[in-house]
Structures are given as C-alpha cells and as structure tokens.
Image: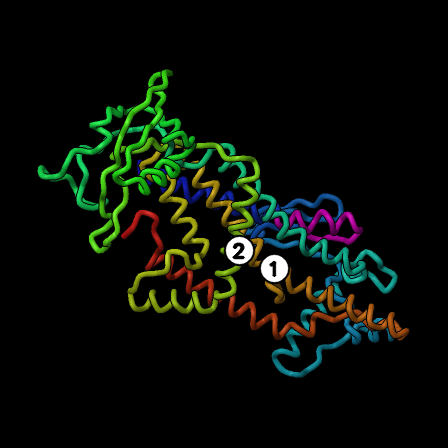
Amino acid sequence: MTVLLFVVGIVVMIVGLAVSIALHELGHLWPAKKFGVRVGQYMIGFGPTLWSRRIGETEYGFKLLPLGGFISMAGMYPPSPREVAAAQAGHAQGRAGGGFFATMVQDARAANDETLQGDDDDRVFYKLPVYKRVIVMLGGPLMNLLLAIVLFTIVFSGFGVQTATTTVSGLSSCVPATSTSACTPSDPPAPSVAAGFEPGDVIVSIDGEPVSTFADVSTIVQRSAGTQLDVVVDRAGTEQTLTVTPAEMTPSADSDATVGFLGIRPTVESVQQPIWAGPVAAFENVGQVAGIIVQLPVKVYDTAVALFTGGERDPNGPLSVVGVGVIAGEVAAADAPVLNRVSATLGLLGSLNIALFVFNLIPLLPLDGGHVVVALWDGLKRTWAKIFRRPPPKPVDATKLVPVTFVVVVLLIAMGAILILADLFNPVSILGR
C-alpha cells in the first residue's frame, strides 16, 4: 500500500507539472493571439508528438517528454538581411560557411524566416510594440505566479496550517532537568498537575492577558519562573481560574539561563489563515527561490561534490523534477491524515510554480527573461533615435545571440543532469536518512 501511495504521489506531481506548463504556455498564447500574432503550435512537452489537433491556424498537442513546453510564434526575430536580399533578388539563399556558431545562427534565422509571409505580413512578433512583446513574454511566468498564489491560498485559508493551539492535550508528570530530558523519580511534579489542569482545558487568559495561540502561552510562562499566575481556562463551556507558579527549568544542558515551565502539551490543529496569507507566503517563497537561483552555480557545484563524495546534501538546495517527484511520493505515503497529505502536495506544487516563475525571469536567452531584455533593448534603441531625431534603427536581431543561447542551454542541461543524478543516488528526503 505504501509503495502504491508513493507512486500515486509521483503521478500527481507529474500531472501537476504538466498543468503548470500548460498554463505557462497559455500565458504566452493568449496575449500573442490577442495582439494578432500568428501562432503555429502550442505544445506541452518535447520530443516526438504523441497527439495533436489543428484548431484554426494553431496546432495543439502533447509531446513525449513532459519537461517543458512551447508555442511557436511567427517572426520571433526580424528576417535575416540575406533572406530579405535573396527574396528581393527572386532566388533562395544558399548555405554560407563560417564555422559551427555561424551555422547555428544561420539555421536559427532560416527557421525563423520560414514563419514569415513576406514584408507586408504584420502578424509577426517582432513588429509588436515593445510593451506588447514584454506582455507576451511575461505572460508565462505570471501564470505560474498566479497559480502558486491560488494553491497557497487553498493551503493556508482552505486546509489551514498545523498550529499549536491553547487547548491542552496532556500534562507532563514532572519538571525535567532540561527541555529534552526524560522524567526521573527525583524530579519534582509539574506545576500544571498541582494546579489542577486537565486535558481539554482551553486557556483563555493568563494574569488578565488574553492568549490566542500556544506561542502566546509559552511567552508568558517562560518569563514568569517563580511568579504566581492566575490562568483562566474554559472547561466544558465553563470558565475557571487556576492558580499556578511556573517552575524554573534549564532549556538545554549547555545553557546557564532558566525559563518558566508549566508542564502542559498543546493540541495541534489545522487553523485556517486569513485570505491574504496565501499571497504573502507565495511572495516570501519568491524571495527564497530567488536567493537559490542567484547562487545556483555554487549550489549545483556543492550538490555535485556531495554526489561524488557521498556527503550530505543541503536540504534547502535545488532539486530536479526527479527530486520533487520523490518528495511528492514521500508526502503521499506518509503516515498522516489524508487532508494533511493533500495540503502538503498542493504546497509543494505551489513551490514548484514559484521556481518556474523565478527561473524563467533570468535575463538570458532562451528563457522568457532573455526575450524581455531583447525587447527592452530594442525599445531603448528606438527611443534614443527618436530623442535625437535619427532614422528608426533596424529591429534587434536576437539570432546573433544564438552562440550565447547555445552555451546557456548546455549549462542548463549539465546542471539539470547533475541534479537528476543527485536526486537518484543522493536524494533529499523529508523522512530523514
């Protein structure tokens, strides 16, 4: 049964990833069509096509590897000068020499030129105003951010957060030497027992100070060692006042300080959070993921070292899709209530979408952030020419950046391979080692 649940968790995460990718590409597709750009394909996945159907001028489909997706827009880049000259001369352009990178540039231009239908074709991406190009390219990442906000809102405000409440679940039998020590026959009895606390009591206030969480209770108790307190509890609908004096306890063996100790254990319940808690958590997650992305080369290197030396991985380091799937499987197979497992899975999927949002904003081609930078640079050149009353410049030809794009892709593949191997042979586990 555990193995089956583990597999179910992985399948759910794969489906969730496919939906996230589909929505990401929809975030590009919808504004592109809204602005009149011809979109030839909308595909989920890479590799051989499993299924496709043409609706209007766009082919929609699924490919074998659900590790990404794409839409093909007409005229992502302006036509190459040689193609324009060849078209004007009435003959096709032949292949030019120039080495590996020159050939890559030419191939990229040729693939782009195939989507053009002549100089009078205005339904192309590169002819859009700068702000529209930016909207199209940011539409994908923003869909991931919105999906993450929705998922976190469901988790925090729908399922709730596991919170230690003011309801007493049990009592300690003694005052241990430290917070981690077990009771011994020589330890004095816990103040809560002597004061008459009972499981099920709901603590309402302490010395006239209302409390709403167990953290509030702990704060007051820990600062009140040796001080008599009047604690109001709700017992079966009736309020009672109990008088108790917190005992002194050392938090840890290497500490000289003492704190107050009452000897009560809280009830942990799912507490629904305000509606804004989900968006706040999403944006906090954006900051955390951005910090990881900034240090990505270093963190991937550390992961590689841990992989080949057998060292322990950073639990807060980057994961591949394999690693996320393993954690999803562990969550599904965990010994916990079903609702808690569903909530944790949705939270994991929300974090995955935050990662997609942040990663795609990296200002390097072929990522969305790279296309945004190209569009902004084109707009800056045009604004500069307009200010100084110069002729409009030619559109920025991003195909010239194909060599840089190639290097970025190679690095991304290498980092992805390292993370996949690490997740297979030296995985991060929520269950511990």
Residue 28 is inside the magenta segment: yes
Furthest residue in direction bottom, as rendered: 98
Taking the spot 66% from the left edge, 83% from the top edge, the residue there is 98
Taking the spot 52% from the left edge, 36% from the top edge, the residue there is 154
Q: Is 131 on the left or on the right of 282, as rendered?
A: right
Main SS class of the magenta portion in the image: helix
Q: Which mark is residue 361?
A: 1
| Image location of residue 326, percent across then percent down | 38, 49
- Residues 164 and 7: in front is 164
Q: Magenta residues?
A: 24-41
Taking the spot 40% from the left edge, 36% from the top edge, the residue there is 162
| Image location of residue 299, percent across then percent down | 43, 65
Cα distance between the residues tagged 2 and 1:
13 Å
Q: Is 20 on the left or on the right of 301, as rendered?
A: right
Which quadrant holds residue 275? top right
| Figure check: 314 above or below 104 | above
Secondary element under disc 2, as helix, strand or loop, is helix
| Figure check: 354 above or below 302 | above
| Mark 2 or mark 1, earlier in chain | 2
Q: Which mark is residue 287?
A: 2
Amino acid type at circle 2 is Gly
Image quadrant containing the N terminus: top left
The reply to whether discs 2 and 1 touch (Cβ–Cβ < 8 Å) is no
